[in-house]
Amino acid sequence: MGRPRLFSDAERKAKRKECSAASYAKHKEEILSKQAARYARDPGKVQTRNAAWRAENSEQYKASRKEWESRNRKNINARKQAHRKKDPSRSNFYHAQWRASHPEIVAAALKKHRAKNAVEIRRKRAIYLKVNRAKINVIAKRWRDANPDKQRQYRQNSKKAHPGGASARENKRRAIKKQAPISGLDVIQAWVESWRSKRKAVCFWCQAVVPSKGCHADHIVPLSKGGAHAIENLCISCAPCNGSKNARLPEEWNARIAAPVLL
Ligand SMILES: [Zn+2]
């Protein structure tokens, strides 16, 4: 007969845990310095043993690591950030690898980012284009010369996608060339797209209702006579009117048409 037991198994286990925690707290410095010394003597040995323990107790290891990480989230992030700042090449390399193997996630994130920052992106892009215009032109021309088929296809697609876009761009280009004052390009673009998207349009000069396809955005006072590339100076013109008006001032042109337009 053994001695009667004072504590149950669970109680003894809890007691032991309590004791060892108290002892650890009491001798923490000593334990840590011993650990450090052991590691310094033979890092490989400690590492191998630790790895073996982690492999054998992977669930426990994962749980305790997760718990530790959630307690030290702030420090971990700060340290990671500092590390990346110190040597970006390594983290860039891993990020590039990750991006390459998760194209869908990257595309979705990019789309979200672009939608959220559309205004800012457009602003920065405009600045970039302005600053690097000469360089971009050279590169673009080289590409166009090397890929004439793609270039043609691209132009056709773009024309289809933006019915007013091509002529709006063309008008802008001419306005810049003639150093005419330019204002409200967004408004002009929207206006051109709106009437181009309809089947019929009314010519400002002869009042004919004609297919909008053949119409032009016409400068009432020609750019070459000091007219501005602005919505106030634009009208829809049918092809014949646009062709014979040429660079005439509205007064000169009015004198030649059957029903002069009030300006
Ligand atoms: Zn007309």
Image (spheres, rainbow, N blue to C red):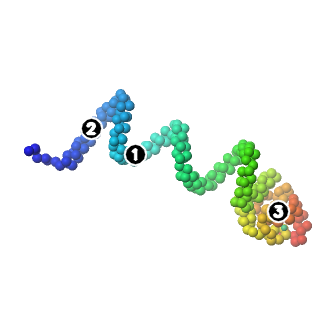
Q: Are the two marked residues, 3 and 1, in contact with CB atoms closer than 8 angstroms?
A: no
Q: Which residue is mark 3?
A: 220
Give the residue type at disc 1. Glu
Front: mark 3 or 1: 1
Give the residue type at disc 3. Ile
Q: Is residue 193 above or below residue 91?
A: below
Q: Which residue is mark 1?
A: 69
Apparent side of residue 71 relative to residue 238 in the rendered image (left or right): left
Q: Is residue 68 above or below residue 231?
A: above
Image location (x, y in percent) of residue 116? 58, 56
Residue 210 got which mark? none
Q: Residue at x 80, y 64 (%)?
A: 214
Apparent side of residue 167 relative to residue 50 in the rendered image (left or right): right
Q: Quadrant of ligand 1?
A: bottom right
Residue 230 quadrant = bottom right
- Residue located farthest toward the left when viewing the structure as drawn: 1
- Of callouts 3 and 1, which one flags the residue occurring earlier in the amino acid sequence? 1
- Helix, strand or loop for disc 1: helix
Q: Is residue 86 above or below residue 131?
A: above
- Helix, strand or loop for disc 3: loop
Apparent side of residue 88 relative to residue 46 in the rendered image (left or right): right
Residue 135 quadrant = top right
Distance of label 3 from label 1 (alpha carbons):
70 Å
- Helix, strand or loop for disc 2: helix
Image location (x, y in percent) of residue 22? 25, 41
Q: Which residue is mark 2?
A: 26
Q: Residue at x 62, y 52 (%)?
A: 120
Distance of label 2 from label 3 (alpha carbons):
92 Å
Q: Are the two marked residues, 1 and 2, in contact with CB atoms closer than 8 angstroms?
A: no
